[in-house]
Image (tube, helix red, strand yellow):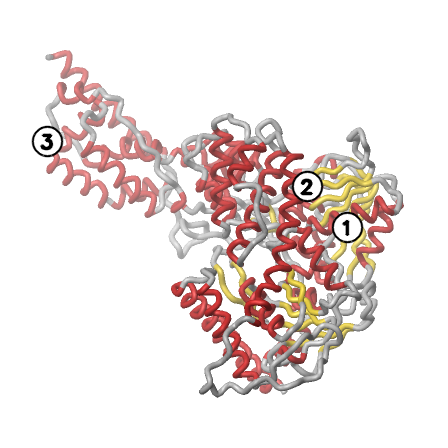
């Protein structure tokens, strides 16, 4: 017993001595808010200079506590003293929590108020619920409860527990170094080893800026084209090979080598995310450079601009990016040579809005900003006896090209195009007049929230510039709106200067996340990203891109056992998270991969129920589009994990077949609408709707028949019969119809208030 007492006394002296040494070595308390210096919760303002080395205060709400266990020697502590009484213990712990001195000491160790509270709650639960505490902690708590110790003696054990559940606090300096993004130019030593010539081709759409850059690309001994879309990369791939310059195609889902033996050509056309920053080229072309500010994809343009190993880099884009690109290149010691271009063909703003679909003319393109509006407008056009082509973002590339060809064909009866802003890039279209159906567009803000925002000048010019292109049959373009109230708003938007580009996007790399994971092995990938962004430091030239889509996928597959690098690659896959079938497929792909079971052609066919048939309704069409995206996902993964996704060639073959089925489906949907409306029952005898009257056609060869009614009565009849038909065919449920009506009403109210407010503003300015 005497030996046990001596042991207990030794433990007490050692723990109290440890506390006094730590308290004496602790730095002075942080300055108050009234003094100079950095206080907790304060984030210093960003500067465009890279010399600011003030550490960024982390967002401690992102710190997820890790579960800890006792060493299991609590029986020794109880034997040395006696079992602890829970009620008395709770009083002691709460007294410790209320001590201001303890909170100040914890703040000196990096604990703000939130973190201190979270650590205390965990510590209290640990002490009260653990059956066997560590011997030294048990003895200290016993002494305090018996009046033989001070409540402050708990602090070393509290800190030990806190740093066990928050391991990132012990490696904060290392984490800050890893997440320091202030000098990204140093990430690309190969590019810094050469003196590059930067040429900026600046101008609006249809000004020939990209043409001149591509001419230099074709003249060079070697070159790379970096574009924002697969369609643009494919266009340059075809132009180059047609011109006799062998060129390969590299996108996320496709590798095409013109050499029969698979040798790489001297030229390559790729999507910008796929460009190599280690391969030397004579000339590189970076298209749509203004997208360097894109909240989600801007990092790809930053990487290409800073990292491409090319003697000449030709960037093409809006003049609003000139000053920023020039400033960015100062950090690399490279000068920028600017070539300015003007539009090759004029376009003007009409003095009249279209107001009624009866006033459509050949070469018109109605621009909508949602798929529902696309369907609604195209149906109303079909009812008027007109054929129209339809283009929107989720259609496969082959279907988009087929619809564009149909619209461009002078011998085809289709003279009207209904499209989203997907026509802004990548498609050559013979458009005479752009008609904005709305001037508000769904947008995802920095918090990942969806909101309706008015078109920016840059977006409006990009779309309006598709009218009257140099290579089309219309040598002069025109732009207007569908609604009269929108026209003065459009004129005001187009009259404003384009907002200048001010920052470039950055994104954490797989290597940086792996280093984070080394220090925080228990953290999830999503939590690693959150902490990285919280600690990251960027100067005023850069911003960290939105990582919500990445985190969405990371959370989806967190429960699946994967190596960190594989998990990271899966989460960078470009998928449409709005499609449930695509998300389900992504999950199944990851689960199959984790089992080390190859995803074969037969497995994929069973998963998507191949072979698929042409759609009978809109629901079928949406599913076919989702199936096409699933095959895209397979192809994308097949170039990252070839052994696990071995049947890329077979998948590509059925994807081409599926593209053809979707093309047939798009055509059949419009025909089905026309046929269904023609078979609709005639109005009741007592109906007040006037009968059809003969009308001479205003679109030669395109108009079949048209009922002459007032605009309000016609639209009401169309909407009633359309909704009834969709309900009868099972395309809509009553609940979904009510939800859509509420959303349309909300959008219309927002659009009306926006138009009214802008019109009032214009009157005041006048």
Q: Residue at x 27, y 41 (%)?
A: 102
Give coordinates of residue 256: x percent, y percent.
74, 38
Q: Residue at x 52, y 72 (%)?
A: 680
Instruction: Please give the label number shown on residue 146.
Output: 3
Q: CA distance from mark 2 to mark 3?
A: 69 Å
Give coordinates of residue 750: x percent, y percent.
49, 74
The number of numbered badges drawn on the structure is 3
399, above or below 108, in the image: below
416, above or below 154, in the image: below
Instruction: Please give the label number shown on residue 235.
Output: 1
Q: CA distance from mark 1 to mark 3?
A: 83 Å
Foreground of the two, 761 or 481: 481
Foreground of the two, 329 or 478: 478
Q: Secondary structure at mark 2?
A: helix
Give coordinates of residue 186: x percent, y percent.
67, 39
Is residue 473 found left or right of 426 in the rendered image?
Answer: right
Q: Mark 1 or 3 closer to N-term?
A: 3
Crowding around mark 1 (Cα neighbors within 10 Å: few <14, some 14 to 19, many 20+) is some
Q: Residue at x 66, y 38 (%)?
A: 187
Crowding around mark 2 (Cα neighbors within 10 Å: few <14, some 14 to 19, many 20+) is some
Foreground of the two, 383 or 480: 383
Instruction: Please give the label number shown on residue 274.
Output: 2
């Amino acid at each position: 017993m005497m030996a046990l007492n001596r042991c207990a006394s030794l433990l007490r002296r050692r723990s109290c001595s440890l506390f006094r040494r730590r308290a004496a070595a602790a730095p002075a308390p942080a300055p108050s808010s009234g003094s100079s210096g950095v206080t907790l919760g304060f984030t210093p303002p960003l500067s465009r200079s890279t010399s600011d080395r003030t550490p960024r205060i982390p967002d401690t709400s992102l710190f997820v506590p890790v579960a800890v266990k006792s060493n299991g020697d609590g029986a020794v502590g109880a034997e040395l003293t006696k079992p602890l009484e829970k009620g008395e213990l709770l009083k002691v712990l709460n007294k410790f929590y209320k001590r201001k001195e303890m909170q100040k000491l914890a703040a000196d160790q990096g604990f703000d108020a939130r973190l201190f509270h979270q650590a205390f709650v965990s510590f209290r639960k640990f002490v009260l619920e653990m059956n066997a505490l560590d011997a030294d902690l048990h003895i200290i708590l016993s002494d305090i409860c018996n009046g033989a110790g001070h409540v402050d003696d708990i602090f070393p054990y509290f800190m030990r527990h806190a740093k066990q559940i928050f391991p990132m606090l012990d490696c904060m300096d290392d984490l800050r170094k890893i997440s320091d993004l202030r000098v990204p130019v140093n990430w690309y030593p190969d590019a810094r080893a050469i003196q590059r010539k930067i040429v900026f081709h600046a101008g609006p759409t249809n000004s020939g800026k990209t043409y001149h850059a591509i001419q230099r690309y074709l003249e060079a001994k070697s070159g790379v084209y970096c574009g924002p879309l697969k369609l643009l990369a494919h266009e340059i791939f075809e132009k180059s090979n047609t011109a006799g310059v062998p060129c390969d195609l590299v996108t996320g889902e496709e590798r095409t080598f013109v050499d029969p033996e698979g040798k790489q050509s001297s030229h390559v056309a790729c999507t910008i995310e796929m460009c190599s920053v280690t391969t030397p080229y004579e000339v590189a072309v970076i298209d749509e450079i203004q997208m360097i500010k894109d909240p989600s994809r801007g990092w790809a343009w930053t990487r290409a601009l800073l990292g491409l190993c090319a003697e000449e880099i030709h960037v093409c884009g809006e003049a609003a990016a000139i000053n920023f690109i020039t400033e960015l290149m100062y950090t690399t010691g490279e000068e920028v040579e600017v070539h300015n271009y003007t539009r090759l063909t004029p376009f003007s703003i009409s003095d009249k809005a279209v107001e009624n679909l009866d006033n459509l003319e050949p070469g018109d393109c109605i621009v909508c900003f949602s798929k529902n509006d696309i369907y609604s407008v195209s149906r109303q056009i079909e009812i008027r006896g007109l054929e129209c082509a339809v283009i929107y973002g989720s259609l496969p590339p082959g279907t988009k090209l087929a619809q564009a060809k149909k619209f461009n064909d002078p011998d085809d009866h289709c003279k009207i195009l209904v499209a989203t802003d997907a026509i802004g890039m990548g498609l050559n279209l013979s458009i005479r007049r752009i008609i904005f159906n709305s001037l508000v567009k769904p947008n995802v803000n920095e918090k990942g929230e969806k909101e309706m925002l008015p078109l920016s000048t840059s977006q409006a010019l990009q779309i309006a510039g598709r009218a009257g292109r140099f290579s089309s049959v219309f040598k002069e373009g025109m732009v207007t709106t569908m609604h009269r109230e929108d026209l003065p708003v459009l004129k005001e938007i187009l009259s404003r200067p384009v907002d200048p580009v001010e920052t470039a996007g950055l994104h954490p790399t797989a290597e940086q996340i792996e280093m984070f994971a080394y220090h925080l092995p228990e953290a999830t990938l999503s939590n690693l990203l959150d902490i990285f962004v919280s600690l990251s430091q960027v100067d005023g030239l850069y911003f960290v891109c939105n990582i919500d889509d990445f985190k969405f996928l990371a959370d989806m597959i967190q429960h699946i056992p994967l190596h960190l690098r594989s998990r990271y690659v899966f989460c960078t896959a470009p998928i449409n998270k709005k499609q449930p079938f695509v998300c389900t497929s992504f999950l199944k792909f990851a689960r199959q991969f984790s089992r080390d079971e190859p995803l074969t052609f037969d497995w994929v066919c069973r998963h998507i129920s191949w072979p698929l048939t042409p759609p009978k309704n809109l629901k079928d069409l949406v599913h076919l589009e989702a199936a096409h995206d699933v095959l895209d996902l397979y192809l994308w993964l097949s170039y990252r994990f070839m052994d696990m996704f071995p049947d890329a060639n077979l998948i590509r073959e059925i994807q081409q077949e599926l593209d053809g089925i979707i093309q047939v489906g798009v055509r059949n949907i419009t025909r089905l609408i026309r046929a269904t409306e023609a078979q609709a029952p005639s109005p009741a005898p007592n109906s007040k709707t006037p009968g059809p009257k003969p009308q001479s056609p205003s679109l030669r060869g395109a108009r079949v028949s048209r009922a002459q009614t007032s605009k309000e009565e016609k639209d009401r009849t169309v909407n009633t019969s359309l909704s009834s038909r969709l309900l009868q065919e099972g395309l809509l449920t009553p609940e979904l119809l009510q939800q859509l009506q509420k959303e349309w009403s909300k959008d219309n109210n927002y659009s009306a208030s926006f138009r009214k407010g802008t019109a009032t503003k214009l009157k005041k300015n006048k």
